Amino acid sequence: MNRLLTTLLLLLTFGLGIQAQTWIWYPGDMDIWTGNRINDLRTENGAYWPAFWRNDYHYQTVEFSKNFTLEAPETVQIAVEGRYGVKLDGQGFLFGQPVVVNIPKGRHTIRINVHNMTSPPAIWVSGLTVKSDTTWMVSNFADQQRADTWWGVDGKPMFASVDKRPSCYHLPVSATHPIKTERSGNDLFAEFEREGIGYLQLNGLKGNGQINIYYGESPAEARDKGRSYLCDKVMVTADSITDLATLSTKPRLNNYQLPSSRAMRYVTVECEDGVSVDDIILQSEMKEVAQRGSFECSDTLLNHIWQTSAYTLHLTDREVMIEGIKRDRWMWSGDAIQSYLMNYYSLFDAPVVQRTIWALRGKDPVRQHINTILDYTFYWFNSVYDYYLYTGDSGFVRRIYPRMQSLMQWVEGRLNGRGMVEGKQGDWVFVDWSPDEMSKSGELAFEQMVYLRSLEAMRLCADIVGNQADAKKYTEREQALKAQLTPTFWNGKAYVHNVEQGRQSDVITRYANIFAVLYGYADDSQRASILSEVLLNDAIMPITTPYMRFYELEALCALGRHDQVMQEMRAYWGGMLREGATTFWETYDPKEKYPQRLAMYGHPYGKSLCHAWGASPIYLLGKYYLGVRPTKPGYAEWECKPCLGDLKWMRGDVPTPGGNIHIEMNRKQVIIEATGCGTGTLFIGDRRVVVEPDKRTTVKL
Amino acid sequence: MNRLLTTLLLLLTFGLGIQAQTWIWYPGDMDIWTGNRINDLRTENGAYWPAFWRNDYHYQTVEFSKNFTLEAPETVQIAVEGRYGVKLDGQGFLFGQPVVVNIPKGRHTIRINVHNMTSPPAIWVSGLTVKSDTTWMVSNFADQQRADTWWGVDGKPMFASVDKRPSCYHLPVSATHPIKTERSGNDLFAEFEREGIGYLQLNGLKGNGQINIYYGESPAEARDKGRSYLCDKVMVTADSITDLATLSTKPRLNNYQLPSSRAMRYVTVECEDGVSVDDIILQSEMKEVAQRGSFECSDTLLNHIWQTSAYTLHLTDREVMIEGIKRDRWMWSGDAIQSYLMNYYSLFDAPVVQRTIWALRGKDPVRQHINTILDYTFYWFNSVYDYYLYTGDSGFVRRIYPRMQSLMQWVEGRLNGRGMVEGKQGDWVFVDWSPDEMSKSGELAFEQMVYLRSLEAMRLCADIVGNQADAKKYTEREQALKAQLTPTFWNGKAYVHNVEQGRQSDVITRYANIFAVLYGYADDSQRASILSEVLLNDAIMPITTPYMRFYELEALCALGRHDQVMQEMRAYWGGMLREGATTFWETYDPKEKYPQRLAMYGHPYGKSLCHAWGASPIYLLGKYYLGVRPTKPGYAEWECKPCLGDLKWMRGDVPTPGGNIHIEMNRKQVIIEATGCGTGTLFIGDRRVVVEPDKRTTVKL
């Protein structure tokens, strides 16, 4: 019975069967609109800094429609975000904007036209049997599609009541007090227990004058007046308070909450002569989402790393998944795919993954690579299949598939004569930040690997949506490109960095070699060679960003180097903790000194100290030490290959769509208890043990 | 000196040389946004009725930039519609949203990022030398284009001061009192002197209760409670007044102006028990634009027709040119091209033509025909060349040309195997409303004619923008299609209606034959045959809409049948005046009886009684009786072939970009005085007289 309820919850959560009533809108539009809204929050020095790629928008005018038959007359309530008109059965319009419609028994067609410039047209319809759900159709007057909904966290739909208007959704706010404040002259300097994001509130305002606020992720930044990355200025007069960054004015109040959310752990509030502040609080803005994953072990440093990683990810898991809370506050496809993977091992916040995938993709026609970056387009494809593998949500694949098709068609229009991808005019070939210049021209082995993986994702998703022509096409393209990889790029020991004008480069970088391991493109002998000649070879340019280190450490795990990876985690992430980090950083080089290490992109405090890609231990510990991963979509089947390394014991939970997989392991035994998923296989050395769900399985070592 | 001033005014008006300071924005965006705003004003029964085609939107985030050198330091004021950030010389952002920037002497780059969801991002920059004008660049972060401005009416730029914010532009409003009011029971019935559009104002509200307002273009409509096309309902309580159509509430006032503009000549204000109104006025909303064209003659009926036509056109010449003020209040490309032509002979409101052309076109990618109608796409191309011919404004052609290219490429992707256009899935093949069914399938001769004319427009515009490859391509396509016309559609006497599966239809309709004459595709013997076998042949299905009658009458003029056309004008437009019309109608059939003749589209009052296409006598009288037309763009050269018909005398003005061409003619002489244009040629019988500008030319007959 418990399992039945879990299954129902699962169905509800992912909309696989039951049609639940929610607000509805044009597919993807709420996501794209939300993504734009969040991307637009970036500021530097209080100034608006937009993302530098082309944005798409929600359709401002759409028509919702439904055919239905009533056994009895029905009174239907209508609520709309936007200006609207209602037509019943092809008759003339009902007067004005009706909020209640009485419908007689019989067959009917209802049409609701909605216009909304500032947020996506959305409707809520509520009768005994006629309800807004995904059985409605919606048209932008060019393309007709099935209406979409934005499913909520943890199976509790966010917009499943009339008063939960989609455009009004905001993350909740709660007051956080500083742990320490000090005054010197006109300055109030405050420190919070850990980094956070939200709205600073000035309490007990007295007098008139200007107040300057300098935020910092570090004490140095908050104390460096006029150079902190984030700042605010407020003008207090007898009658009013004006925020000088947004030029918005409010009547004078005793306590004033600033209108712009800012990331901070430290803050200096500088009161110019004539004005003063009693104290401050942070109205902290964070998503309410359960921490379903867990990890605990005999090493308190690793526990601290896991907790700090989880907090870092939680801060960046917002309306959409952003890359950093101070800067850029943007969705980056390459960062996002890592956030998604970490998320599957902690929050299992599936709706935010959908939303970020829609928002990154935007609408047709495709005009640029996602974020303008060649590689980021390919990560986007791969993120769709990852999502399906972890959640089993084929409905989402069906909805997004047309935009996968059009993006892939655009990519195909830019292939070179050998069917390979190259950076073209306007493309940013990123790969990774690296201290040494690396070539970005010609055919990069790395780019072909991520492109090949995208073809694989297309083939798999074409199968899911039942598009046989596409499945055949992408199988052929995948095979053709796969057959070229080794002849083109393998030099006998490793994949070289690139090929220019048909000539193999002499340069070997780690990137392509890492992905050849991760994606299974290298055979056993190649894997052995990659390990010794590249990954363990100090002569090869090292990876310095946590971004690419994510893949490097995963490749080392995949090659069985768990012990080495655990030591790396202790050294690298432990190093940041020793420096006092409460969230993980964008980059970390133990050799750099404070405060110089805070600089990045030409700004003395440009580096982000709460960066999603810093949280990768969540993923590594969940997938390679607790050792759990789905082998069929949505954990219909799964495996567990636990690895204790040098630990005395570990325990933890890996969330699945319908429950959790709980693992406890010490030197003597492994205990697994999985709820709400399919059958698992536990691998212990050469042993394979079947793990039935909703039962406790104990295996002696 | 007078001429120099005129020339300067001309340059200013069309931005051909002098860079004037105005608000600036992304090219076309203010036009597209304005077009959407106006299209969205349609209601029926107080309910929102959106246009049923796909809309494009303004870019919400753009970056304005300019490189410049200052000889001395300068203080620059900045005003922005939207949220913004300012960067100078690649330094970090200036704090917040600066309204004043001090710039030192030397070379500089300024960048202003702007975000605005509700109206196009727009900036006003004002320093001694640094000003917002069309020398700035603007980018949507995917396509970089030169900043565009929305030029004002009559050379007075609408947005040439900081307080004239583009998004705040609205037509002016002035009070109009009814000429007659009568009360019966709770009803107040009012009649205005002539049809108008604006906001009804209820004066002297007393008591509480609901007020129902029924508007009418005819007394019958305004008296037919609950069936009038336009209506409003207002709920008056002790504290507030709520407009029930928009659900907007205001505090209780003595006088209440309704929030929605409505067309009306008559109105019934029905006060339910407990509430009353002293009187009403119409806050009439009309564009302030000079009536530069004129026509007067010895026949008072023709004078009345010209004046009523001019008033009809003035009512529909609004922010953009709409087709009717009661219904649909939309831009329709086929209606618009006629409005433009009438406009060139009356208001000469060039900015509204630009704006309507941009707004009809929207953005790339093309997804549908303009208004979903095959023929309307082709009228759109032709309207661009017409605009250039009458105004000489090549700058506009350069700005719009990329969207001509992409629309034509889309058309070319849908040609059939013989290089001809046919209606495809989702296309509306309109041609004309006709009482008898006509075939819309296969290759319609009419559609090939308007397509061929579009190829001609592409060729001409490619020449203007200096795109030689396009000029060559479209010359070839034009020649190829032209060569096919007669072999495919001419049956020896006339062009047949269509060809299906290679077989010429037996049906002859007037459409293709009219356009073959107008566009010069018929040779002299064909023209003679078309006149006798089609245009003067009562056995051929007659034209019943003023829309297509526009072209039919023009074709008759082109074939020298001026006397017949003048009689037609007296009969048809004179007929409407005898019925009491104050504006001209969407359709008119003298045989139909009142009030049945008010019905259209299944609604008893569906017919529009103020319809732009009803105003065509302006065009016919200006072009074929005053006889003036440009022979080189912008009246650099022009001709006058006056035709007095049966009139004793006539006089009038035809506006040109830089002045007016004034003509007076009686049986004894012709006098012409042209200012601010090039040299003209007066044709009198076989005589040709050169008309120098800014001099009075008198020719004895």
Image (cartoon, coloured by chain):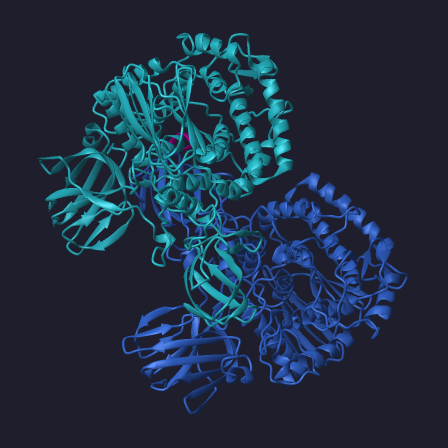
Chain colours: A cyan, B blue
Residue A398: horizontal and vertical position, in percent?
53, 42
Answer with the quarter of the image where residue A562 lies: top left
Majority secondary structure in the magenta region: helix
At a point 35% along the width and 18% down the height, the residue shown is A643
Q: Is residue B291 visible?
A: no
Task: Tell me if residue B563 is in the magenta stretch.
Answer: no
Residue B669: horizontal and vertical position, in percent?
73, 74
At a point 46% along the width and 86% down the height, the residue shown is B189
Quadrant housing the N terminus of chain B: bottom right
Left or right placement of residue A381 versus residue A676 in this view: right
Residue occupying the far right of the picture: B492
Quadrant housing the C terminus of chain B: bottom right
Left or right placement of residue A137 versus residue B593 in this view: left
Left or right placement of residue A359 versus residue B556 in this view: left
Left or right placement of residue B639 versus residue A554 in this view: right
* Stretch in magenta: A335-339
Q: Is residue B215 visible?
A: yes
Answer with the quarter of the image where residue A501 lies: top right
At a point 51% along the width and 15% down the height, the residue shown is A497
Task: Tell me if residue A338 is in the magenta stretch.
Answer: yes
Answer with the quarter of the image where residue A2 lies: top left
Position above or below: B78 against B618: above
Position above or below: B145 against B168: above
**Of A691 and A507, which appears nearest the observer?**
A691
Position above or below: A332 against A6: above
Position above or below: B39 against B232: above
Residue A467: horizontal and vertical position, in percent?
61, 39
